[in-house]
Image (cartoon, rainbow, N blue to C red):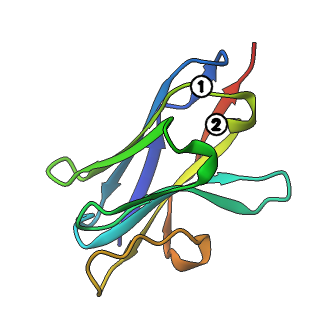
């Protein structure tokens, strides 16, 4: 079935930028909600942004105006552009996908997702 692989993480100074990619294989990402989640110190996964099949998006308040989620269905890939990074953005970022049977839903809760990538580390430090 669907497999996801994240890339693009790394070490960046505060105020810098990173672009994360989530490449899918095994199935098309069309008709899926895609979310990016950051693992917390308590090992929970907090939603960062999500994007629905039709492009509807939802952002956590902490990243609004700084992060942008987008999807390229032709490349079967979802991106997370991260600008003006802060130390509190540090963590392991996972992409996740959930098949949508109702178009337009952007799912912000980790429990809603069936398919997960392995994660990519983002460290923001001076």
Q: Look at the numbered disc 1 and give the secondary structure of its residue.
A: strand
Q: Position of residue 28 (x, y in %)?
A: 23, 65
Q: Position of residue 83 (x, y in %)?
A: 50, 27
Image disc number at residue 111? none
Task: Name the foreground residue: 27 vs 37.
Answer: 37
Q: Residue at x 66, y 44 (%)?
A: 92
Question: Viewed as shown, does residue 10 lie left or right of 78?
Answer: right
Q: Residue at x 47, y 44 (%)?
A: 6
Residue sitting farthest toward the bottom: 101
Residue matched to label 2 = 121
Q: Residue at x 75, y 12 (%)?
A: 126
Q: Position of residue 70 (x, y in %)?
A: 32, 47
Q: Are marks 1 and 2 in contact (CB under 8 Å)?
A: yes
Q: Quadrant of the N terminus?
A: bottom left
**22 versus 96 height, above or below:** above
Mark 1 and mark 2: span between their CA atoms? 6 Å
**58 versus 14 height, above or below:** below
Picture quadrant of residue 123: top right
Residue matched to label 1 = 10
Give neighbour class at mark 2: few <14, some 14-19, many 20+ (Cα, 10 Å): some
Give neighbour class at mark 1: few <14, some 14-19, many 20+ (Cα, 10 Å): some
């Amino acid at each position: 079935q669907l497999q996801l692989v994240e890339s693009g993480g790394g070490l960046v100074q505060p105020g810098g930028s990173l672009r994360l990619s989530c490449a899918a294989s095994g199935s098309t990402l069309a008709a899926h909600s895609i979310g990016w989640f950051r693992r917390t110190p308590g090992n929970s996964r907090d939603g960062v942004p999500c994007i629905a099949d039709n492009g509807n998006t939802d952002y956590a308040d902490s990243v609004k105006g700084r992060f942008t989620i987008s999807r390229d269905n032709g490349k079967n890939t979802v991106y997370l552009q991260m600008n003006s990074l802060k130390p509190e953005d540090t963590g392991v970022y996972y992409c996740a996908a959930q098949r949508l049977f109702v178009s337009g839903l952007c799912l912000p809760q980790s429990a809603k997702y069936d398919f997960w990538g392995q994660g990519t580390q983002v460290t923001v430090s001076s």
